Amino acid sequence: MNFQEQPSDILATLGKLRDADAPTHGGRVLSYVYDSGVAELDELAASAIRMVQPVNGLDPTTFTSVAVMEREVVAFARDLLNGDDDVVGSVTTGGTESCLLAVKTARDNWPGEGKPRLLAPVTVHAAFHKSAHYFGLELDLVPVLSDGVVDADVMIERMGPDVALVVVSAPSYPHAAIDPIAKIADAAHEQGIDCHVDACIGGWVLPFWGDLEPWDFRVHGVTSMSADLHKFGYAPKGISVLLTRGRDRQRAQYFATTRWPGYPVVNPTMLGSKSAGALAAGWAITRALGRDGLAELAASCARSTAFLIELIDFIEGLRVVGSPVGPLLAIATDENVPEDRRVDPHHWADQVRSLGWLLQLQPGLSQSFGVTLPHTTHITVTPVTEGVMAGLAEALMAAASDVRGVPPVSTEDALASLPEGLADTLGETHDSETALRVLVDVGLVSMDGSGLPEKMAPFLALITALPAPVTERLLTELIARTFE
Ligand SMILES: *Cc1c(COP(=O)(O)O)cnc(C)c1O
């Protein structure tokens, strides 16, 4: 074969593209990536992926390795989450797919008529917004308290025969808050309502997180759980587990049809043909680490998280939101100090970024009743964090000193930054050309196609200031144009 381009050149190009990415290793990016810091695990995962590269995960009877690996990964997860013989599961391509399938399964098992409701705290992962949207459920979000934890009684009051699924988190992504799972799940159980525990981020680390109230299948009312191996299972992206209590309940997850002139289709998950790569990698990593290895890595995360919580408490003007359970935390302004001593978490994150560390900005949220959730900055801690803690701590403190007293970008300022007249027309931004023009006017997209601005704080303020449908449309345009 005469290639039009030599493999070595192609890989050199890819290398250059990868160099422009945020660093996936070394602990400088404190979200998105979950770096065990164990180089052998990356090597093992790469080799495992390579070995199954040509396999089609569509058919576990033809490619039997897929069935064996999936069985073993599910068994490991079930054991970790204290499921008994009645708990069955599937490997999915990620947290979102696990959540989607949990919702679809509950919807299909729901005995009612009409449009069912999905009941969850406002802190539930956006994947459930997507699930409700895709599968036609009404999303009923319950406000949380200022520590990010939902009041069980308020959740229970809202339960009813039209609820197909109650979702709680262990812990929630925005604040690492663990919902009162036992109380909510048991109340749901009494009313015959299914209850999903979203342990996408916590599932592979909370089993080693000291003494917690039961939050997994030890709670009878818990009917399904999601737990991502591509987070604290340290697998490459593309693998999560969805566990379901009861074979009969779980079978509604499947799609099967023989009503076409091709092969009979039986899909436990959303995809048809699929890679076995992430499965093989996740399988290999769980075998290499076992419970002890996971526990050891979790202990490192726990030490780093405890240190960071103390550090934030020590930094004047910042505070940790609530009591995080697990290796993640949200940081807000400490309103108990005078205004000129406060640190805005978004200015702070921008400043930390200029020092070479990437934190994740989270918008505030005004709830339908109760407290308004402040805007925060999110940190996910991983095992590599411990080795870079000195540098990180220095950057976090220095950045706080740099921006202490700088007021947050106000709603008025954010809107005032818009070009004249734009705010009024934004509500009608539906076509792609208008949306692009707005993005350029706002300064989020430059005509030469360069990326996001250096400072994210004004951007986040604008997101909060504009009506959600408007920002959602604009962000869609932003990402679509990024790909074009
Ligand atoms: C990450 C996450 C998800 C979604 O998972 P993806 O793997 O990003 O699709 C769902 N719930 C929680 C709590 C998460 O942290």
Image (cartoon, grey):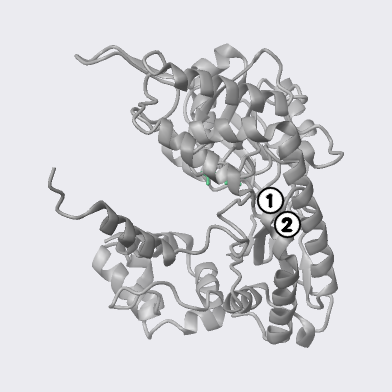
In which image quadrant can residue 362 be found?
Answer: bottom right
Q: Position of residue 38 (x, y in %)?
A: 64, 48
Element carrying mark 2: loop
Q: Amino acid at mark 2?
A: Gly
Whereabouts is ligand 1, in terms of quadrant? top right
Q: Residues within 10 Å of mark 2 (few under 14, many from 20)?
A: few
In which image quadrant can residue 203 be found?
Answer: top right
Mark 2–mark 1 Cα distance, whole angstroms, equals 7 Å
Instruction: Left or right? Give the position of 256 relative to 130.
Output: left
Q: Amino acid at mark 1?
A: Pro
State the residue at coordinates (64%, 36%). 167
Element carrying mark 1: loop
Instruction: Left or right? Give the position of 313 relative to 127.
Output: right
Q: Nearer the viewer, residue 220 or 360?
A: 360
State the residue at coordinates (43%, 72%). 452
Q: Nearer the viewer, residue 325 or 229?
A: 229
Q: Residues within 10 Å of mark 1 (few under 14, many from 20)?
A: many
- Which corner quadrant holds the C terminus? bottom left
State the residue at coordinates (22%, 54%). 6
State the residue at coordinates (53%, 44%). 43
Residue 457 to residue 2: above or below: below
Determine whether the beta carbon of the residue marked 2 sits less than 8 angstroms from the nearest atom of ligand 1: no
**Label 1 near label 2: C-beta < 8 Å?**
yes
Q: Position of residue 393 (x, y in %)?
A: 75, 71
Q: Any mark on residue 370, and which?
A: 2
Q: Badge 1 is on which residue?
A: 143
Residue 31 to residue 227: above or below: below
Q: Position of residue 413 (x, y in %)?
A: 54, 83
